Image: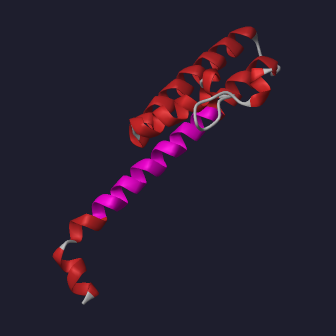
Amino acid sequence: MAEEHKLINPEKGKTKLKKNRHFNLGVTLILLSGLAFAIMLTIPFLNLENQAKVIGTTAAFIAMEVLFYAGVFFVGKELFKKYKSFLNPKNWFKSKSGEQTDSMRK
């Protein structure tokens, strides 16, 4: 009986699998952008010529931005908005109900 259900609607499983692949690809790209950021920060401390440092840092910065926004494209704007709200300093000391904690009131 379960096999008949799979034969009747084979597209439903494919779309969910495709969506999961896009989501996983997006998360991977966002994580790789963090790696590019770390590389960008370490390049100035390497024993290289100044011109190589500038070129390497610029290339890492461009790669970081491209990877991040490509990841956001695949993940979706809802998750991006949630991620962005975590990075907003206004939200760091608020409780879940939207009020400030006791330590912030003193």
Q: Nearer the viewer, residue 52 or 1?
A: 1
Instruction: Tell whether position 65 is magenta.
Output: no
Tell me if residue 71 comes above or below residue 91 in the rendering: below
Image spot of residue 74 (x, y percent): 40, 41
Q: Which residues are magenta?
A: 14-34
Quadrant placement of the C terminus: top right
The location of residue 93, given as percent across then percent down, is 69, 28
Relative to 49, is 100 on the left or the right? left
Quadrant housing residue 103: top right
Specify the quadrant that holds the N terminus. bottom left
- Residue 97 location, x and y as percent? 58, 36
User: Relative to 49, does residue 101 appear above or below in the rendering?
Assistant: below
Outermost residue, top side = 50
Q: Which residue appears farthest toward the left when viewing the image?
A: 8
Q: Is residue 5 left or right of residue 31?
A: left
Frontmost residue, 45 versus 41: 41
Residue at the outermost bottom position? 1
Residue displayed at 60% across by 16% down: 58
Indicate the quadrant where residue 92 lies: top right
Where residue 62 appears, as percent x and y from the top left, is: 53, 21
* Magenta-span inclusion, residue 21: yes
Display coloring:
secondary structure
Which residue occupies the foreground of this view, 52 or 3? 3
Tell me the chief SS of the magenta region: helix
Q: Is residue 40 above or below residue 86?
A: above
Q: Total marks drawn?
A: 0
Say whether residue 99 is left or right of residue 50: left
In the picture, measured across the screen, residue 36 lies left or right of residue 71, that is right
Q: Measuring 40% from the left and 49% from the top, which residue is drawn there? A: 22
